[in-house]
């Protein structure tokens, strides 16, 4: 995984705490928009903002704002019927779907919501929107898994699973129009198929999780061309891949587990993982059987790319937590990160 030169790093101070950042899928090649979930501790208020991004010099210009009734716990973006879409879940359990204007995607045209206590008792840990924006999955530590159908004028939902708190879910990711994955405590992962009733069709629990420090999966990603492999990041710097073809043989990419030390760029919570479509793999042999390069961010301020059997590449090291990042699908050399100390960093890789 060679890197020719370090990325350009642009730090953009903000006046509010940044809870999450996402690129908004573009409607045209001219659209470069970022969506930011912010929290103002002085007024105890939260909002979702859109900012236009200009690369040279790197600037973010506020365009529009939607005020949230509660603090944002999970933020995702997608497209639906040629309209940009933002899904914002809250710590009070409400879900809000914001539709952008098809003519000017920087501005929110409408909002649909499910109020608190309908989907979850307590915070929504994670939401993910299916490609195409027709359905959303929500999970929570209350043990519920919900599917929300996104209509133009209303939202409807059905409960897929409810453990009544016996099992907690902390992450979720769509794999196909009928399949999705969830994660939770004990480095556990579950695979769900809507075509098959009766709960998860496959499950995994990390054998390296210790009783004194039960690991938590914070983030999941699934590669569009390798939907049988689920990527997960969580506690203790742990990043691993779960292949449904060999469901009890996880591939550890980072962290220390099962007596095997791996190349670990961090030792704290890994808050987000994403397959890195920009990084070139060092493994040119049998590519189909190897895990592709993966970008991660952590509580101890590390943004890095890890690859199976290779030394990690550190892209950013901050004195504060990096609690989220997003790789631009249109320009995968560009990465936006939220820094805990009221700042956003944008990296442009050569």
Image (cartoon, grey):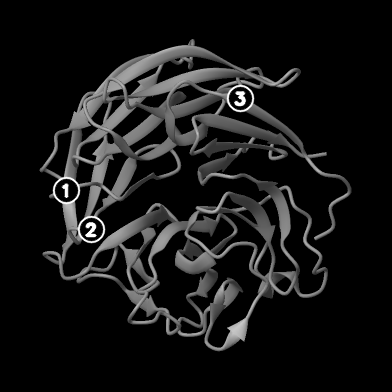
Camera-side residue: 234 or 86? 234
Categorize mark 3 by other alpha carbons within 10 Å: few (<14), some (14-19), many (20+): some
Give whichever of 191, 233 is nearer the camera.
233
Mark 2 and mark 3 in contact? Answer it, CB < 8 Å: no
Q: Which residue is mark 1?
A: 122
Residue extending furthest toward the right: 4
Q: Is residue 271 visible?
A: yes
Q: Position of residue 331 (x, y in %)?
A: 69, 34
**Residue 174 at x, y = what percent?**
41, 53
Who comes first in sequence, dot 2 or dot 3? 3
Mark drawn on residue 103: none
The answer to whether mark 1 and mark 2 are in CB contact below 8 A is: yes
Q: Secondary structure at mark 3?
A: strand
Measured Cα–Cα span from mark 1 to mark 2 = 8 Å
Name the disc covering residue 12, or none.
3
Residue depicted at 49% across the width and 30% down the height:
342
Locate residue 58: give its quadrant: top right
The label shown at residue 141 is 2
16 relative to 307 in the view: left or right: left
**Distance between the Cα atoms at labels 3 and 1?**
33 Å
Q: Residue furthest bottom?
A: 259
């Amino acid at each position: 995984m060679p890197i020719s030169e370090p990325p350009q790093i642009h730090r953009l101070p903000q006046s509010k705490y940044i809870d999450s950042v996402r690129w908004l899928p573009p409607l045209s090649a001219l659209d470069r928009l970022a969506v930011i979930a912010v929290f103002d501790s002085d007024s105890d208020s939260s909002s979702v903002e859109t900012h236009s991004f200009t690369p040279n010099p790197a600037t973010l210009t506020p365009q529009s704002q939607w005020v949230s009734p509660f603090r944002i716990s999970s933020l995702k973006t997608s497209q639906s019927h040629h309209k940009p879409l933002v899904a914002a879940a809250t710590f009070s359990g409400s879900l809000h779907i914001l539709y952008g204007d098809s003519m000017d995607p920087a501005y929110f045209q409408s909002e649909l919501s499910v109020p608190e206590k309908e989907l979850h008792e307590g915070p929504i840990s994670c939401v993910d929107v299916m490609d195409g924006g027709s359905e959303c999955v929500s999970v929570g530590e209350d043990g519920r898994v919900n599917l929300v159908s996104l209509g133009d004028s209303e939202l409807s939902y059905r409960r897929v699973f409810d453990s009544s708190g016996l099992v907690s879910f902390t992450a979720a990711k769509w794999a196909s129009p009928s399949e999705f994955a969830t994660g939770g405590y004990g480095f556990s992962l579950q695979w769900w198929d809507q075509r098959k009733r009766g709960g998860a069709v496959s499950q995994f629990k990390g054998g390296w999780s210790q009783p004194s420090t039960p690991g938590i999966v914070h983030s999941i990603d699934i590669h569009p061309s390798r939907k049988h492999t689920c990527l997960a990041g969580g506690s203790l710097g742990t990043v691993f891949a779960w292949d449904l073809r060999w469901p009890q043989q996880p591939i550890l990419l980072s962290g220390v587990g099962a007596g095997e030390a791996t190349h670990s760029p961090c030792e704290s919570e890994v808050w987000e993982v994403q397959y890195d479509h920009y990084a070139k793999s060092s493994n040119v042999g049998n590519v189909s059987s190897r895990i592709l390069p993966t970008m991660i961010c952590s509580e101890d301020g590390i943004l890095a790319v890890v690859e199976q059997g290779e030394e990690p590449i550190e892209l950013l090291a901050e004195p504060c937590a990096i609690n989220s990042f997003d790789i631009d699908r249109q320009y995968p050399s560009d990465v936006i990160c939220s820094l805990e100390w009221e700042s956003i960093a944008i990296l442009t890789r050569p």
